[in-house]
Image (cartoon, grey):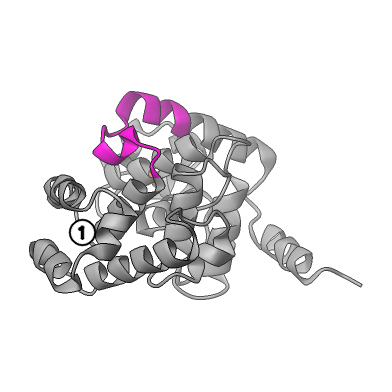
Amino acid sequence: MNDPSQIKKNQHREALHLANPQRIQLFQRALLKWYEENGRDLPWRHTRDPYRILVSEIMLHQTQVDRVIPKYHEFLAAYPTFEALAAAPVEEVQQLWRPLGYNFRPGRLHQIAQNVVANYNSQLPTTIKELMALPGIGRYTAGAILSFAFHKDAPILDTNAQRVLQRYFEVTGDPMRAPAKNQLWYLAELVIPLGKAYLFNQAILDFGALQCTSKKPSCQICPLIKKCPYGKSHRVA
Ligand code: SF4
C-alpha cells in the first residue's frame, strides 16, 4: 500500500518546480555564509538550555526582539528553572510579564512548567508529538526547541522563513492555507543541510528579518538575486 505521507511529499515536489538540488544547495550555502557575516548576537543564542530557549520562543511570539531582551533577562532572574516557575503563583508571573503584552502567554508558560515538572522530571520532552501536546506549543515552537535546544534537524516556519521560502521557491497562494502552507512546511524541512538545523534555522530567521524583509527586501545586495524570481522582478534598492 502507498504511504500517504510519501504521496503528499511527491505532490509537493511536483508543485514546486524550483526546488531542485542545485537551487537548494545554493540557497543553503548562501544563507549560511550570510548568517556568518550578518547574524544577530542574541542572548538565547548563548545557551542550549531547553528551558531558556522555550522562554525566549514564547516571548518572541508577535513581539520584537529589542523588547524581548530585557524581559528575558528579568524573567530568568526571577524564575531560573522549570521548578522555580512551576512553584511561583501564576498571578506573580503574569505581573512580571505584563508590559510585554499578549498576556495569555505567561499563564501558558506556567502550565507548561507545571506539566514538565509533574510528568517529565523537569526536563522538556524531545519528540514533536510530546512537545505539541504541551499548552501553547505549536509546530513552529516545537521545531525551534528541537533544533535550537536538542540539535535535531527539525523545520521551523515563522512569517520570516515563510516569506524567504515563498519568494525564492516561487510558492504561490496564501501561505496560511493549504496547499501553499503544506508546501512551505515541506520546503522548510527539505532545505535544512544535514546536521545543521541549529545554524540554518537561525540563518533563515535572521535573513527574513534583516535582508528579505516584507516591504523593502535588499535584493540588490542579496546573494540569491541571480536565482530568485521575486528579486528579479521586484528589484528594490
Ligand atoms: S533576491 Fe530579494 S526577494 Fe529574493 S531572497 Fe534575496 S532579498 Fe529576498
> Per the image, is 35 magenta?
yes
* Quadrant location, ligand no. 1: top left
Q: What type of secondary structure mainly makes up the magenta span?
A: helix
Q: Where residue 47 appears, x then y in whole percent?
A: 35, 36
Residue 75 position (above or below residue 178): above
What range of the chain is rendered magenta? 31-49
Q: Is residue 214 visible?
A: no
Relative image position of residue 201 (x, y in whole percent): 45, 43
Which residue occupies 10% across, 67% down? 98
Q: Which residue is drawn at 41% across and 68% down?
A: 115
Q: Nearer the viewer, residue 68 or 216?
A: 68
Residue ID for mark 1: 63
Quarter of the image for residue 25 reads top right
Q: Tag 1's secondary structure?
A: loop
> How far across and how far down the image is residue 158, in percent?
39, 58
Q: Quadrant of the N terminus?
A: bottom right
- Above-or-below relation of 90 to 76: below
Q: Is residue 29 left or right of residue 210?
A: right
Mark 1 nearby-residue class (10 Å; few <14, some 14–19, many ≥20): few
Of residues 77 and 52, the one drawn nearer to the viewer in this rendering: 77
- Does residue 2 lie above or below 145 as drawn? below
Q: Which residue is drawn at 60% across and 58% down?
A: 186
Inspect the magenta stretch and tell me whether residue 196 lies in it. Answer: no
Q: In which quarter of the image is residue 179?
A: bottom right
Question: Quarter of the image containing the C terminus?
Answer: top left
- 180 to the left or right of 145: right
Residue situated in front as seen by the camera: 159 or 42: 42
Q: Which amino acid does label 1 sit on?
A: Thr
Q: Which of 83 and 7 is in front in this view?
A: 83
Task: Tell me the residue at 56%/50% (across/down).
Answer: 154
